Amino acid sequence: MLLAGACQGNDEGQPEANGSIPVAFTARIASSDTRAENATESKATLKERGGFGVFACYTGLHKYVDSNVHPDFMYNEHVTSDDDGATWTYSPIKYWPNGEGEVTGLTGENPHYVSFFAYAPWRDVSTPDLDQDSYPVEYCIHSFSQQGEMGNPWLTYRLHPNLAKQVDLLCARPLLDRTKPAISEKLPFVFDHALACVGDKVTVRCSAGLKSQIDNRINASITNAKVVVTSLKIDYFLTAKARLVLWNNGEPNWQTILSEAPTCTRTVTLIPNESETEAIVYSKIGNIPTEITIEDTWSGKGVYYIPVELSNYVQTATVSISYHVSSYNGSRWIDDEEKTGTAYIVLHEYNKGDNPGYKPGKHLYINVSLNPMDIALTAAIAPWVTEDPVDVEGIEE
C-alpha cells in the first residue's frame, strides 16, 4: 500500500519521473528565546542538539482519529542536518502513499492520509538510561509510547537533578491529515518550548510603610538610613516527571504519571553572591534606587518545571529573605537586628487563564515586598529579552 521503493526524487519542486515523492521536512523554532541551560533557540542549535524525532501515522482513506491509530509510518525517525538547519535529512527515505486526497473540499477518488508529530532533541529509544550527567538527553527524555500502541504518540520527561544539565524540550505543532503532493514539498515543523520557567530573578521592594519608617529615622543625630538584604533563597517544590502527548493542539499537552515519584525539590541561593556590593533596597543616601533586582549567579536562566499539577502536590516557590535597617550617626553605621521573612507562590496559578507563564519565550519572575511586619510575594510575566515585567494577578500569601 505504501510506496517504499529505493528510487530517489528529483530536485525540489519538480515532478517525480516515476510518481514516487519523498517525504521531506523543514524545521523552525517558534520562539528564539532560551528555555533551559542546554537551550535550543535556533535551527543551528537544533542541529547541534542532535536533530529531532518524528512519529507519523498512516490512516489510509480515513482522517486522523487518535484512538484508532498508531505510528506505523514513522517511529521516532531521526532527522538531522549537516548545514546548520538549512536542510534536514533522514534514512532510509520514506515515500508518500498514492492517493489524491481532498480537492476543493471534496474527497478525492483515492485519498491516503498521513499525520506527523515531532519533538526535540532526538533520543535513541534503543539505548537504556545512561549516566545522568554524561547523557542528559537520555535522562530527561525518559521513555516513549510503543510503536504498536494505539493513540497519540507521547514521551515522558523528568527534571534533571543538576540544574546545569536540564534539557530544553521542544514539541512540534502536529501536521494532521497530509496527503501526497503533486510535486516534492517539505512539511514545515514549527517547534514550541514545552517547559515552563520560574526565574531566579527576584525584584525586592520596600513597602510604603517601611519607607516611611526609614524616612522618620532622619533627625539631627541620624543623617542617613538604608535597608540592606543579607540573604535570599528560593526553595522549589516541583513535579518530577510527567508525560507529554505530542498532539498539542496549540500548546504542550502534559499529563500526570501518578505511579511515579511525584515531586522533587530545588534550592537556589541568590545572596550572598560573588559581588561585594551591598544589596541596598532603599536608602536616603544620594541617588539609590527604590528597588533592586537580584539574579542567580550560576546562570541567570532560572529553574525549569513541568506545567502540570498533581492532585495532591502543588508546585510552589518559597522565598526566604533576611534584611536589616542601618542608620548612620555621622561617624559609623549602626545595624538593627536582622529580620527574616518567608512566603510562597503557587506556580500553577500563573499558568492558566490570562497569565500564561508557561508560554514559549515567557519567564515568570518573583516580586518581594518588604513590609514593616512581614514580606509578601507576587509574580510577573515577561519575555526573556526585556527587563520590564508586566504584573499579573495570582495567589499571594
Image (tube, helix red, strand yellow):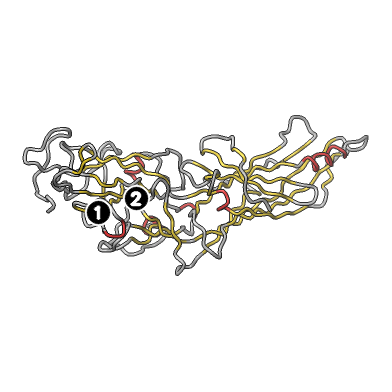
The answer to whether 257 is drawn above or below residue 175 in the figure is below
Residue 327 horizontal/vertical position (percent):
84, 41
- Quick check: 80 left or right of 332? left
- Quick check: 64 left or right of 280? left
- Quick check: 250 left or right of 380? left
- As drawn, the label of residue 57 is 1
Residue 156 horizontal/vertical position (percent):
39, 60
Residue 161 horizontal/vertical position (percent):
48, 59
Residue on which disc 2 sits: 119
Mark 1 or mark 2: whose residue is earlier in sequence: 1
- Quick check: 199 left or right of 252? right
Q: Nearer the viewer, mark 1 or mark 2?
A: 1
Residue most toward the left?
A: 18
Q: Residue at x 67, y 39 (%)?
A: 292
- Residue type at the position of mark 1: Cys
**Local secondary structure at mark 1:** strand
**Local secondary structure at mark 2:** strand
Residue 291 horizontal/vertical position (percent):
70, 38
- Residue type at the position of mark 2: Tyr
**Pointer 1 local density, CA inside 10 Å: few below 14, some 14–19, many at least 20:** many
